[in-house]
Image (spheres, rainbow, N blue to C red):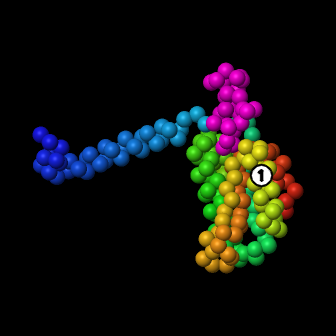
Amino acid sequence: MALKDLLSSHPNAMSVALFGAGFAVATLVLRYRSRSPRGLVGQSSSNTTNSVNGKGDHSLETKVAQEEYKMVLVVRTDLKMGKGKMAAQCAHAAVGAVEKLAYVNMAALRHWQNLGQPKVVLKVDGLEALFDLDKVARSKSITTCLISDAGRTQIAAGSKTVLALGPGPASVIDQITGHLKLL
């Protein structure tokens, strides 16, 4: 019996087949995302040890669990965004940073979530300061997400508004942003 004949002779056969295919894809995605992560905070790191590869005696999960994690959102104040606009841009940056970290290091993301997802919002006066922070954070293997506005409301399209750093080790993020003031 051909597949076409089978599907047309049983009214629920298509639903069952689609459910099975969806279930299989979801299972594969979940298995892939829960694999052992690379690096501590979103990128490969040469100083990370992992007992699985025999280069150290601490597992990545142990190293992640030993330190406080946080996210810092850095807002440009020279754009004179309204409070609602700033809040929306911060939300975009936070979601983007979490999505990036989920892709490369689920253990670090889960650790940050288990700590209550701590976030701090800081301010800078201009674009250069945002670019400088992004460059330093990337050099220290900290996940970043720089938001460019769509230009539909208060500011010009393409304006860089907010930079998210982390989630990552608080001590590393503090080295990068410790000199900035709260928004």
Q: Looking at the picture, which amino acid does disc 1 mark? A: Lys
Residue at 66% from the left image edge and 65% from the top image edge: 148
Residue at 69% from the left image edge and 49% from the top image edge: 143
User: Does the magenta segment cover residue 96?
Assistant: no
Q: Residue 1 sits in which quadrant?
A: top left
Locate residue 25, reporting x and y percent. 40, 43
Residues in magenta?
38-63
The C terminus lies in which quarter of the figure?
bottom right
Q: Residue furthest top?
A: 54
Locate residue 156, reporting x and y percent. 67, 75
Q: Is the magenta stretch mostly helix, strand or loop?
A: loop
Q: Nearer the viewer, residue 58 or 124?
A: 124
> Which residue is denoted by mark 1 in the rendering?
135
Is residue 57 shown above or below 74? above
Q: What element carries label 1?
A: helix
Residue at 71% from the left image edge and 36% from the top image edge: 45
